[in-house]
Amino acid sequence: MNLTGVKTVLPAVAMTVVSMVLTLAVVVMWLGTAMPWMVALVVGLGIDGGWLATLAYERRLAAQGDHSTGVTAVGWGFGVVATGVLVAHALTAETNAGAWLAVAWLPIAAKALWLVHGLWERTALTGEALDAIQGIQQEARDEAAVARARLRAEAVTEETRLTAVTQAGSRVAHVQAKTAKTLSRAWSTLEAAREGKETGRALTSVTTPVTPGVTPRWELPVWGPTTTVTPLELETASALTDEALDALVDQIRHSESPALSYREMAVRFRTSGHSASEVRLRAAWKRVVAA
């Protein structure tokens, strides 16, 4: 029995001894007036002896890892009888009734302490098991602390990155706004020079070619979105007919033996300088292969 077991069993033993002595004294004093004191002593010893016998048997069964409900019930019965004797004596006592009633609960308290001790014995662990449990708990706490630190570090890193990106974007936007403002001022200056009477005439005089009798107007440089030529417009200018496209695809496909795959044919088709949309080229391939 280790230190914890001693802490639970000593109060139970002390409470049991006090309860047995108190029960014996009350029985002798109370029943001694109605019968010979020797008989009263036997009655008191009988109550205490029965209680002690059932308690010893319960402890033996607990040491063997067993339990008997009947023995436990008998032990609680002796405890209730002892408590009943103390309560009855307190209620019939002419003096100090409150004091006797205040200690009447000691037998039940002693049984409760033995119950607590039994529960401790059934749940007690060895030192090795307690050390293993503490190690597991400490490892779990360490892992949780590391995970929290990692999450905090990642959050700080992400916050720093977002701050840097935001600041860079702000600087880029500032430069773009400043550049746009400078271009706007330059454009306004050019337009003012173009619309001016004297400056417009001077700028017009240096434009080439100058046709006799015609003074070409000096135009402002283009500043703004430009119209791009779409691939469809480029292809439409030199689009192949379906027959010519089929013949060209068949020629490239059978330029090597075995015949080329569609991917190889398409690469050679475009590297040769020919142009056709992916839809038309694949349709021509299917027609050639099916032929």
Image: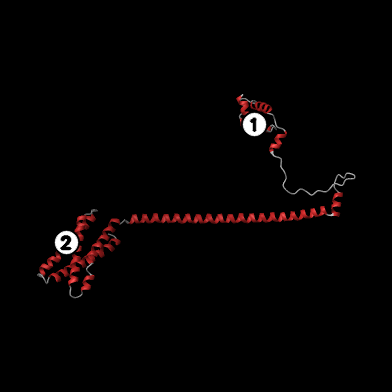
The CA span between labels 2 and 1 is 108 Å
Mark 2 or mark 1: whose residue is earlier in sequence:
2
Quarter of the figure that contains the C terminus: top right
In the image, residue 25 above or below residue 167: below
- Left or right: residue 227 compared with residue 89: right
User: Which residue position is annotated with label 2?
Assistant: 50
> What residue sits 50% from the left and 55% below the top?
151
Query: Which residue is outermost to the right?
Result: 212
In the image, residue 211 above or below residue 74: above
Q: Secondary structure at mark 2?
A: helix
User: Which residue position is annotated with label 1?
Assistant: 281
Rendering coords of residue 137 (x, y %): 40, 56
Q: Secondary structure at mark 1?
A: helix
> Callout 2, which amino acid?
Gly
> Callout 1, which amino acid?
Leu
> What residue sits 46% from the left and 56% below the top?
145
